[in-house]
Image (cartoon, coloured by chain):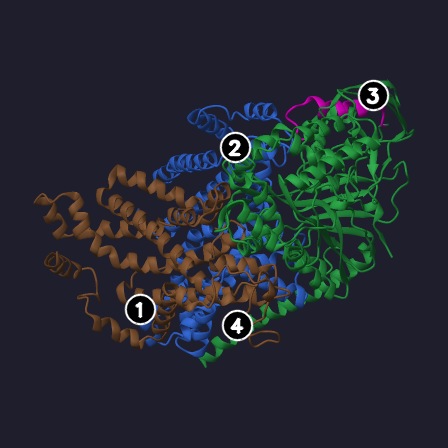
Chain colours: A brown, B blue, C green
Amino acid sequence: MEIQKETSTAPLTEPSKKNTTKYSIIKWIIPLLKSKTGMLGISIVAIVCFTAVFAPLLAPYKPEKVDFSAISTPPFWMDGGSFNHILGTDNLGRDLLSRIIYGAQISLLVGISSVGVAGVIGVIIGLTSGYYGGLVDTLLMRFVDANIAIPSILFALVVLGFMSPTIITLIIVIGVSSWIGYARVVRSEVLSLKEREYVKAAKSIGVRNGTIMRRHLLPNVSSSVIVIATTSVATTIITEASLSFLGLGPQAVTWGKVLSDGRDYLSTSWWIATFPGIAITITVLGIIFLGDYLRDMLDPRIQE
Amino acid sequence: MKYFLNRTAQVIPVLLIVSFILFFLVHISGDPVDIMLSENATEEDRETLRQSLGLDKPFIIQYFIFLTNMITGDFGKSIIYGQAALPIVLERIPATFELMLASIILSTAIAIPLGVLSAVKRNSPIDLLISGISILGKAMPNFWVGLMLILLFSVNLKIFPVSGTGSVFHLVLPAITIGSAMAAQMTRLLRSNMLDVLSQDYIRTAKSKGVKRLSIVYIHALRNSLLPVITVIALQISTLVGGALITETIFSWPGLGQLTIEAINARDMAVVQACVITIAVFVIIVNLIADLIYRFVDPRIRY
Amino acid sequence: MNRKSVVFTFTLILLLILSGCTTVGNQSENGKSAADKKEDRELKIGIPNDIKTFDIHNHNQVLTEAVHINMFNYLFKRQADTKVETELVDTYKLIDDVTWEFKLKEGITFHNGDPLTADDVEFTIERVAKDKTLAEHSNMEVVKDVKVVNDTTFQIITDDPQPTLINLLSRIGSGILPKNYIEENGWDHFLNKPVGSGPFKFVDWSRDNRIVFEPYEKYFEGKNEEWDKLVFRVIPETSTRINELLTGGVDIITEVTPNDIARIDENEETKAVSTPSQRVTILALQHREGYPTSDPKVREAIELAINNEVLVEQILKGEAVAVRTRVTPGNFGADPSLYDTYLYDVERSKELLAEAGYGDGLELSLSIPTGYYLKGDEISQAIKAMLSEVGITLNIEFSEYNRYIELRNSGEFGDMYFGAYGNSLFDASIALDMFASENGEKRIGYSNQEVKELFNSALTNMDTEEREKQYQKIQQIVAEERPFIYLYLQNEAYGIREGLNFKPRVDSMLYTPDITRN
């Protein structure tokens, strides 16, 4: 397996890519250190991921722990605040810091899983469509058009409005409504890749289609897919927040939910909505920076 | 011409797929009868209503009825309004269209100067500031921008009305809210396009021939960078309509978006279906037009 | 040089944009203040959703009726103090137990000039009593027949004796429709250009935007002189509604959430007012065999574990009253001993659970629709925390409203469901129907022979005093057996501009002739 990868990917990628001749760590690290925004992006993302993974260890309280004696406590630097609740509490006395820490877990889970769903669907459709062409292509591209015609937030709203919103439905809905980007890019790359000699050669010696797609085409489109996937996580986090805002998000502790819980109290307890809002914005910024950096590194040709 | 016909013919299967997805979604969502009747209604009342709505027939038959009705423009009766759904939906299009147009104009008006400026002043503090703002514009949720704009410009500064319709001033805040993300994206795209073009040979040639810098920027670079911007507008229509859903609700703007949300909340299937199909047709048409313009402007493009 | 000119150009553009903004600002400011003076006699009310329709029989939404009440007249009208008085009716009498005879006032006309006669009444009531597809049908099907005696006299004949007929005639969907106008122009025309006989006449309805009325010059009680124009503006987003009030965009807003009251009061030009409503929040408990809640001890333990005071004071900021019944004062059959009271005793609750065999803990489920009830999410989380104090683990199961209704109506909701119900009949019968009807038995499996007998007898009992006793007795039994655990009666809060006289009504109607300026 290892050997095959070495022999098949390395020379094959060469004609199409400028920067990724070899996956050597040094070639990644040096420009990363040079790129300030790239560093910033990767640090933010790393911190958020760390928080999400170790949430139970980091959070001072359980996110749903209600405390009637500490309702709407302000953050510690304000009058009436205390170090028991560093960022204050909400209308049920739940600790905001803990909710944001646990929120990172679910928000990231939703973000990454739905991007995974979208990526798998999009790559499969893009590969098949580009590789086989003809009727298959026409048919699949009509599906793409149909998906473009329904704005993804509208699709999500209709589905979640008519079904009980759980985390699973949310992941599937966002995934199913946002695969077009992958499909389009993968398809156009495959269209040019399949004209290359090594693909034609593989075909002529009777390698099965599935194998060609998996072994020769997939590795070559992976860098574009990674770039799209990274920025999609940011979009997903915002979509989830928007759905929660409209009251159609899942009833789990996500950033969007914490934020929309707090918007009723903007005038009296501003901190409830502000901190999750900041968490969302910073994370999204981090992901955008990271995405920009990855794009520059992996595939300068992709436009947004 | 042949291309045009081809492209138009492709719309039909797309609409078929959209309508099927939609019907399927609404169908699996359950029985609307319970929320239409009052608390004390009997089982018999329910059955009568179910029959009058055609809900007692099998799935495929219901879909065929739905499809044939749809072609004739009949989406059924709205639960909320007790009237045919399509006219209710169609009467909302002008409001949404007005808002879309305003936000496209506004975001282009913001993006072009900012994009050019930051390309010309590459890596200067101004460039950094503009890049910063445009990234922030992408990172902030739509609804958040809307709420903050109201607080700042309506409640504190009292410059614009909070919500509703009536004058061109009512249009400004919602248009900015919807357009902010697009403006951000256009700025970034314009900047990188400009940088690309500015480094091309013919610009260098022009420079060396002593053509004034300003006219280089305007006449050569900007013109060549604008084409992709048109594509962004076309591609963003779908997202823009999506943004209208939330923004219209915040600003009490009586367009398609607010109607859709209201219909979803009231489980008014007829209106939801009519809304989604209308939006889909709208997006398809805009994309088609953009496609044709693009092909006309730049004949190298092949599909 | 070149660089400078670029900078110069863009500074110029920016300045232009900015100056554009400021002139825009000035204009709108000026426009507004001028408008304020000119449109002083325009009353603008911000409501959270649009009315459903002008078909008075095909909605069961309080807000829609709250707007309709300004343009239709009723045979009997509930007054601000909840007493029912005659409106279109001059005199009435009971001929026998099932036959009522009414005489209309003279000289009442619809907005199109037609006189309002007994024919219109017959047309209106028979429509809703006969047409099964109308949303209000089930409430009015007790009417068997309407007989026109002459132009101003008619009789209503009911199936059984109907002690609540007058209440029925004054509740949602009981306005009187213009028969000739509808028959001549058709329903669609009426729905777009409705005609009534009330103090205000219809001018315009732009959906999800605004509904506009004007005073009716020939109103039989005299033209309204206080207002020249009445505008209901649809503003769904709560914070936008409040911001419109604060900036003077509207004069009154409805559905103010408890936490926003402080913000409205802080502003000098606005204030919040509230009144107890008719809406009572409940937990319904499963009575079927096999569920832990079928044990009366468990049910009592749940009620004792919930501290209603905390729910009312902390979460609803005092905008509610703890209750143990749905029949609150102002309703016929109210039992004052169950109002403004609650049971709370954690120790006793633990003992009861131990006696019932759940000393080591108990797991229960609660069904609730997402985002439907005021603060439903927070209240249920608070109840979960309270129940955990006595060793009950509560699993809150959120579902989409339609699904919730399905679960509720079929009895598959698990151990408990959360709900809140109003009462536009102002009579105990609606509130207690659940405990005596098949509907209720199907949902929670509660059945009590004594309650059924009392209820069915009260339904047709024309002896007011005895009927009241019967209803009170049912409430005592229910409070003991706990098919429902009552939590609180919600207040309804409004925001108004200073200088308006507006008293919120218990029935949530926005009856504008009662609203005046100082």
Q: In the picture shown, does residue C427 fall above or below B102?
A: above
Q: Which residue is mark 3?
A: C97
Q: Which mark is residue A84?
A: 4
Q: Which residue is mark 2?
A: B31
Q: CA distance from mark 2 to mark 1?
A: 63 Å
Question: In the image, are marks 2 and 4 on the same chain?
Answer: no
Inspect the image, locate mark 1, and give the three-letter code of the amino acid beneath it: Gln
Q: Residues within 10 Å of mark 3 (few under 14, many from 20)?
A: some
Where disc 1 sits, the SS reads loop
| Residue C172 in view (yes/no) | no
Q: Is residue C332 left or right of residue A292?
A: right
Q: How many marks?
A: 4
Question: In the image, are marks 2 and 3 on the same chain?
Answer: no
Camera-side residue of A241 and C319: C319
Picture coordinates of residue A71, whole percent (x, y): 60, 64
Where disc 3 sits, the SS reads loop
Which quadrant would the N terminus of chain A be assigned to in this image?
bottom left
**Are the residues flagged by discs 2 and 3 in contact, CB closer than 8 Å?**
no
Inspect the image, locate mark 2, and give the three-letter code of the amino acid beneath it: Asp
Camera-side residue of C102 and B162: C102
Which quadrant would the C terminus of chain A be assigned to in this image?
bottom left
Q: Which residue is mark 1?
A: B200
Q: Earlier in the sequence, mark 2 or mark 1?
A: 2
Picture coordinates of residue A12, whole percent (x, y): 15, 58
Inspect the image, locate mark 3, and give the three-letter code of the amino acid beneath it: Asp
Inspect the image, locate mark 4, and give the three-letter code of the amino acid beneath it: Asn
Badge 2: chain ID: B
